[in-house]
Amino acid sequence: MRYIIIGAGAVGATIGGRLAESGRAVVLVARGAHAEALKKDGLRLTTADGTRLHRLPVATGPAELGELRPDDVLLLTVKTQDAIAALDAWGDAEVAGGGTAAQRLPLLCAQNGVESERLALRRFSRVYGVCVWLPATFLEPGVVSALCAPFTGILHLGKAADGSDARIRAVAADLAGAGFEAPVVEDVMRWKYAKLLGNLGNAIQATTGPEPDPAKAALLLRAIREGKAAFDAAGIGYATEAEQSAARDGKADPPAGVRGGSSWQSLARGTGSVEADYLNGEISLLGRLHGVPTPVNDVLRHAANIFAREGLPPGAMSIADLTSLADEAAARG
């Protein structure tokens, strides 16, 4: 199998680099200065094992590859706000022997949130979910670090519509051989909904900074309570905290120190967008559909988007001000 990493940022480049180290064929898909750096200087990937330079094929879109191979696996790792453009571009790509990628090739959604699987299933016949536990940093073009150990990350895999098959088990075997814990599960979206609850804090970190603070923890707890209430009202199951702890315990421990998450990194790189619409916004959506108030998540989504749109530096807001906005929204009902 050849792995085409669509969106070779922090997560995508780490997975692609590690797969390449284990002897798998990999193509990195990127854009802008990052694509230029990957083409010119290669991918400098640092893991707990050290730093390696990978010189891999790099593309900005499917046209540069010509006909795709029947054994290609598409790994979607762009942020969810960029998913539709990527799905449309790659879904129409022709595959050797006839048909398109959307008709013939497996697509794995390795992203935060739960929306990309729904978007993909409208277009692709074979869609798989990946619940990503892979703390990684991407702040400079061509340079990525992922320092967890003993595994580089934990990737739960399964069919987006529940279940598993031989194809995803083969992918899992490749990932396991590349330094990841890669369990195949029959209910991958249940794991992704659980991960979403933790990602509700991405907006807090992006706007107020990554440093630990009891007030930040308290606001996150309020956002998670809204999320669980919305899930319960919608009849959505999610992995328990005990299950998640057991799955991660001692397997992919990040190094000590403060590290900015994906939304913080997006602001630091000045990308102009964050995932808040598909993280906190998912809770707002479910709340509106099922009559559950979600004032904290509404405020977090709005604040993070303002930061991205206006190019504000990450951490420029105080947690006291952010909490005050959430309190005011809750009081308005």
Image (cartoon, rainbow, N blue to C red):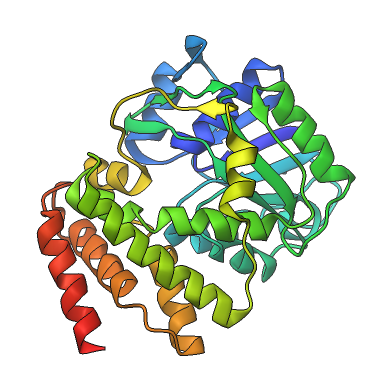
Residue drawn at 70 percent across, 35 percent down: 182
Picture quarter containing residue 247? Answer: top right
Residue 297's x, y, as percent? Answer: 33, 70
Residue drawn at 63 percent across, 44 percent down: 75
Residue 73's x, y, as percent? Answer: 72, 42
Residue 198's x, y, as percent? Answer: 44, 53
For the N terminus, the quadrant is: top right
- 72 sits to left or right of 246: right
Picture quarter containing residue 183? Answer: top right
Residue drawn at 50 percent across, 60 percent down: 85
Q: How many marks?
A: 0
- 114 sits to left or right of 165: left
- 156 sits to left or right of 152: right
Residue drawn at 24 percent across, 53 percent down: 216
Q: Is residue 251 above or below residue 196?
A: above
- Of residue 239 and residue 55, the one placed in the foreground of this image is 239
Q: Is residue 171 above or below residue 263?
A: above
For the C terminus, the quadrant is: bottom left
Q: Is residue 328 visible?
A: yes
Q: Is residue 65 visible?
A: no
- Of residue 255 and residue 177, the one placed in the foreground of this image is 255
